[in-house]
Amino acid sequence: MSEKPTPLEITDAVDFYKQWPRLRLNAEKLLEMRTLNDDDAQVLRWMIKVVDMVGPHDVARDAEGTKKPAGGRFS
């Protein structure tokens, strides 16, 4: 008997970052299925590369639990 997959729920950037290893596998499966047109596949490959560059310091939360800017133009 297979388990019913749980619905995807992402609450914020930190939650997305924590789920990224599983989400990345989903994105790679989409590319492997070859159902995307070339432009969409290229966009998805770039999205994977960009998200892979994000680290825990980029999505840190402050003491109140809200996202804290990690420098740059939002500081």
Image (cartoon, helix red, strand yellow):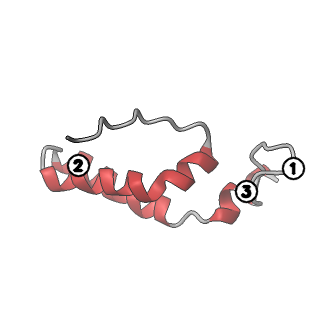
Query: Are discs 3 and 1 less than 8 Å apart at CB?
Result: no
**Quick check: 10 above or below 32?**
above
Q: CA distance from mark 3 to mark 1?
A: 10 Å
Instruction: Give the mark nearer the N terminus: 2 vs 3.
Output: 2
Residue projecting furthest to the right:
63
The CA span between labels 2 and 1 is 37 Å
In the picture of the structure, the residue carrying the numbered disc 2 is: 30
Q: Quadrant of the N terminus?
A: top left
Q: Quadrant of residue 58?
A: bottom right
Number of the front mark, 3 or 1: 1
Residue 66 is drawn in which quadrant? top right
Amino acid type of the residue tagged 3 in the rendering: Ala
Secondary structure of the residue carrying tag 3 is loop
**Pointer 3 residue:** 60
Q: How many marks?
A: 3
How far across and down, in percent of the image, does residue 34 sit? 12, 50
Please state which amino acid type lies under the numbered disc 1. Answer: Ala
Residue drawn 52% across the image and 67% down it: 53
Instruction: Label 1: state its secondary structure.
Output: loop
| Tag 1 residue | 63
Report the residue at 39% width, 36% height from top.
Answer: 6
In x, y percent, where is residue 43?
Answer: 32, 51
Say few, some or many: other residues with alpha carbon within 10 Å of mark 2 (under 14 / 14 to 19 / 20 or more): some
Please say if 26 is above or below 52.
above
Q: What's the distance in space between the residues labelled 2 and 3, CA to CA?
A: 29 Å
Counting residues from the start of the chain, the first of labels 2 and 1 encountered is 2
